[in-house]
């Protein structure tokens, strides 16, 4: 079993739709949960993160973590064509002065005008 | 613009050859990470350097090596190249202190094609 599982999609939605992107993970040591966004032909960039369980909201984006079920979600409200990208979940582990991100394979999202 | 510079952007070479990918981190960042991204494996962590020293190792093949120089730029050396090494190679940097833990700043990648 891979440490982080993410449905690669692709996922295609109409503009204005609510999008739900999900990951599962197996390592209980993960404490921070990051979401990176990667536009075509670009490097990933940090979108938002949560610590431990719970929700975090940032504008149209909400990140949610349920540590009991090892489930990570990212919700996008009122999706826009500019949200079209690949979204990668990336739980974080740390130790010995080093931070390690374990990336999911990413879900490719297309928002159709 | 993340502030991380990678060269070359594209590279085409033959099996058995050796290539060097170069990365300049964001100004002031001490930590450099190398990742390999392919369609079937996703983004795989290869190796991390912090202020010139190797800090962590991931799924890096023995044919691959890296180093970080005193000016903090880093190079990833790939040798005895195989078709399966064709991928996007990303460099990322972070400060590891005073910023969000886990916030890496990625370059735009070097696309390697092995024929």
Image (cartoon, helix red, strand yellow):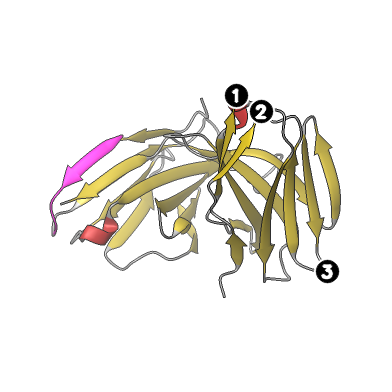
Question: Number of callouts in the render?
Answer: 3
Tell which of A102 and B40 is nearer to you. B40
Asked if residue B67 lies in the magenta stretch, the reply is no
Q: CA distance from mark 1 to mark 2?
A: 5 Å
Residue under numbered circle 3:
A68
Residue under numbered circle 1:
A113
Q: Which residues are magenta?
A: B9-15
Residue A87 badge: none
Q: Position of residue A51 (x, y in %)?
A: 80, 52
Q: Earlier in the sequence, mark 1 or mark 2?
A: 2
The residue under the point 68% across, 54% down is A22
Q: Tell me the SS state at disc 2.
A: loop
Q: Position of residue A10 (x, y in %)?
A: 53, 47
Q: CA distance from mark 3 to mark 2?
A: 33 Å
Q: Quadrant of the N terminus of chain A?
A: bottom right
**Foreground mark, 3 or 1?**
1
Residue under numbered circle 2:
A15
């Amino acid at each position: 079993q891979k440490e982080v599982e993410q449905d690669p999609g692709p996922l295609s939605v109409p503009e204005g739709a609510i999008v739900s992107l999900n990951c599962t993970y197996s390592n209980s040591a993960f404490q921070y949960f990051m979401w990176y966004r990667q536009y075509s032909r670009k490097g990933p960039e940090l979108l938002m993160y949560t610590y431990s369980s719970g929700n975090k909201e940032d504008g149209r984006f909400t990140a949610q973590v349920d540590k009991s079920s090892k489930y990570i979600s990212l919700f996008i409200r009122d999706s826009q064509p500019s949200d079209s990208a690949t979204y990668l979940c990336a739980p974080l582990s740390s130790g010995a002065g080093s931070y390690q991100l374990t990336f999911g394979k990413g879900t490719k999202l297309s928002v159709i005008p | 613009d993340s502030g991380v510079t990678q060269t070359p952007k594209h590279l085409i070479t033959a099996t058995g050859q050796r290539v060097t990918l170069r990365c300049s981190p964001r100004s002031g960042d001490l930590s450099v990470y190398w990742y390999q991204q392919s369609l079937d494996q996703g983004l795989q962590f290869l190796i991390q350097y912090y202020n010139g020293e190797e800090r962590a190792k991931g799924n890096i093949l023995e044919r691959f090596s890296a180093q970080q120089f005193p000016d903090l730029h880093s190079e990833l050396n790939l040798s005895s190249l195989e078709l399966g090494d064709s991928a996007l190679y990303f460099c990322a940097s972070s400060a590891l202190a005073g910023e969000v833990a886990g916030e890496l700043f990625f370059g735009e990648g070097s696309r390697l094609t092995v024929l």
